[in-house]
Image: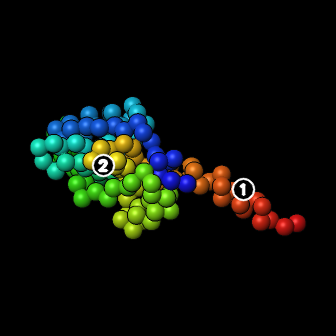
Amino acid sequence: MLVRDAMSTMVLTIGPTHTLRQAARLMAARRVGAAVVLDPDGSGIGILTERDILNSVGLDQNPDHETAGTHTTTDVVFAAPAWTLDDAAEAMSHGGFRHLIVLDGQEAIGIVSVRDIIRCWAPTRRHAAASTLTV
């Protein structure tokens, strides 16, 4: 199965000046764990995750004053729609992250998460495990 088959195409995009509280509200409303941060005047495409927000709050930083741009990961590993889910899982495992922005050229067309991969693999693996049982 390919990344294009598993990814979410509903990409939450925010700017670097959004506060962490604004980002958290938007992420919660859309029930997503990450937002693409577009900074056309700066670092380009980055990602802000729920973990970034959690780390900031854990450091007693004020989510009404901290901005997405300050907490955005900009050295992002991007996925291609034609990657296999194994490729995506390997990149996530190697990099220690749970989301990949999927690019088509320079455009963010989706996000694939660990949850997306598990959702796709679970029925296949369950069926494979069931067929190998012997009684």
Q: Position of residue 9 (x, y in %)?
A: 42, 39
Q: Is residue 22 above or below residue 111?
A: above
Label 2 SS: loop
Between the residue at mark 2 and the residue at mark 1, the CA separation in whole angstroms equals 36 Å
Which three-letter amino acid code belongs to the residue tagged 2? Answer: Gly
Name the residue that disc number 1 marks: 127
Q: Residue at x 51, y 47 (%)?
A: 5
Q: Is residue 20 above or below residue 105?
A: above
Q: Is residue 39 visible?
A: yes
Q: Indicate the quadrant containing the C terminus: top left, top right, bottom left or bottom right.
A: bottom right
Which three-letter amino acid code belongs to the residue tagged 1? Answer: His
Name the residue that disc number 2 marks: 105
| Of 89 and 53, the residue lying toward us | 89
Q: Is residue 49 visible?
A: no
Q: Residue at x 41, y 36 (%)?
A: 10
Q: Is residue 56 left or right of residue 103?
A: left
- Of badges 2 and 1, the one in the foreground is 2
Q: Residue at x 46, y 63 (%)?
A: 87
Q: Indicate the quadrant containing the N terminus: top left, top right, bottom left or bottom right.
A: bottom right
Q: Quadrant of residue 68?
A: top left
Q: Quadrant of residue 34?
A: top left
Q: Position of residue 115 (x, y in %)?
A: 50, 50
Q: Earlier in the sequence, mark 2 or mark 1?
A: 2
Q: Residue furthest top?
A: 29
Which mark, residue 50? none
Q: Is residue 98 left or right of residue 105?
A: right
Assess disc 2: are there few (<14), some (14-19) or many (≥20) residues with their C-alpha within 10 Å of its C-alpha. Answer: few
Label 1 SS: helix
Q: Residue furthest left?
A: 41
Q: Is residue 42 left or right of residue 52?
A: left
